[in-house]
Amino acid sequence: MGYGSLNIIGLGPDGDQHLTLAARAALEQSTVVVGYEGYLRQLAPWLRRAFRPFPIGAERERVLAAIALARGGARVALVSSGDAGIYGLASLALETLAAQGWEAEREFPVAVLPGASALSAAAALLGAPLGHDFAVVSLSDLLTPWPVIARRLAAAAAADFVLVLYNPASRGRCTQLTEARDLLLAHRAPDTAVGVVRNAYRPEQRVLRTTLGALPLDEIDMLTTVVVGASTTRPLGPWLVTPRGYGTVQAGPVDRTPSSPSARGERDGG
Ligand code: SAH
């Protein structure tokens, strides 16, 4: 049997409207899709394929199954939500391949395909909070010791980065978010702008603008991304914006003749 292939694919936040054309094509060319059962459910409405669903947490098993299938001749799509290289399965898959002595010349092709990460999805729904330098920290201490996470949070806060928090809390883990907030409050004012986005671009989507001091701790869970503003981040109308630093932005010419929708009192709904 000839070699198969392994494409490691980011599904975007919803596995549908925000999936790239390249990812869609790779999924359509695959013979089997390996991933967390919840993500495979997102694909089922439009992708008729063999699915290899795995429960949450079984990351090593998922990766080993995907590699074994590719080695056996299948065209495998190994999927993560968002971007597969951002707290996704890409690093574990490549480490496992390397440990198994995989060599490009001798074996099946492997590719990592980018996706829209939760940070771009959350930022888009909030406006433009990532318009200037930002840092991303996962609050999950399952794989990283808490002192390491705390040190990175403090350093990013001291350097006045916008901070994106992934994995902010889960059922068995809620103290980290409280500790993170307290750590950030040592460097940022309580009225620092914060955006909270849950289930971005999914049917249950929720978008909240708040402040660091008023962070609604018990509404934030594993399906939520938190964006903590830098000192320059500010609410502008319905948006959160971190200016790029063009200085004072001029209004420029504004057309308020009756033909413009705003002059007719219309709203664009967003
Ligand atoms: N590879 C993913 C991240 C996986 S880590 C990506 O690039 O998006 C899992 C964390 O991502 C969650 O705990 C949450 O913080 C965030 N996340 C993933 N999908 C999300 C969504 N649709 N809305 C809000 N946050 C999301």
Image (cartoon, grey):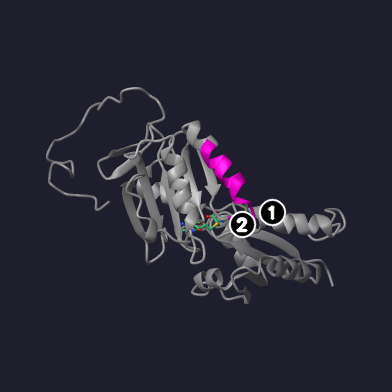
- Seen in the picture, residue 161 relative to 142 is either above or below; the reply is above
Residue 221: percent from left, percent from top: 44, 61
Kindly identify the amino acid type of the residue bearing the numbered disc 1: Ser
Most common secondary structure along the magenta stretch = helix
Tell me if residue 168 can be seen. no
Tell me, yes or no, whether the highlighted magenta stretch contains residue 150.
Answer: yes
* Contact between labelled residues 2 and 1, with CB atoms less than 8 Å apart: yes
Choose between 141 and 210: the one closer to the eye. Answer: 141
Furthest residue toward top: 247
- Seen in the picture, residue 197 relative to 49 is either above or below; the reply is above
Quadrant of the image containing the N terminus: bottom right
Q: Is mark 1 within 8 Å of ligand 1?
A: no
Secondary structure beneath label 2: loop
Circle 1 packing at 10 Å, graded few (<14), some (14-19), many (20+), is some
Choose between 46 and 57: the one closer to the eye. Answer: 57
Residue 248: percent from left, percent from top: 31, 23
Which residue range is magenta in the image? 141-154
Q: Is mark 2 within 8 Å of ligand 1?
A: yes
On residue 88, the disc is 2
On residue 91, the disc is 1
Kindly identify the amino acid type of the residue bearing the numbered disc 2: Gly
Q: Gap in Å between the C-alphas at discs 1 and 2?
A: 7 Å
Q: Is residue 121 left or right of residue 58?
A: left
Tell me if residue 175 can be seen. yes
Choose between 152 and 196: the one closer to the eye. Answer: 152
Circle 2 packing at 10 Å, graded few (<14), some (14-19), many (20+), is some
Secondary structure beneath label 1: helix
Residue 51: percent from left, percent from top: 62, 76
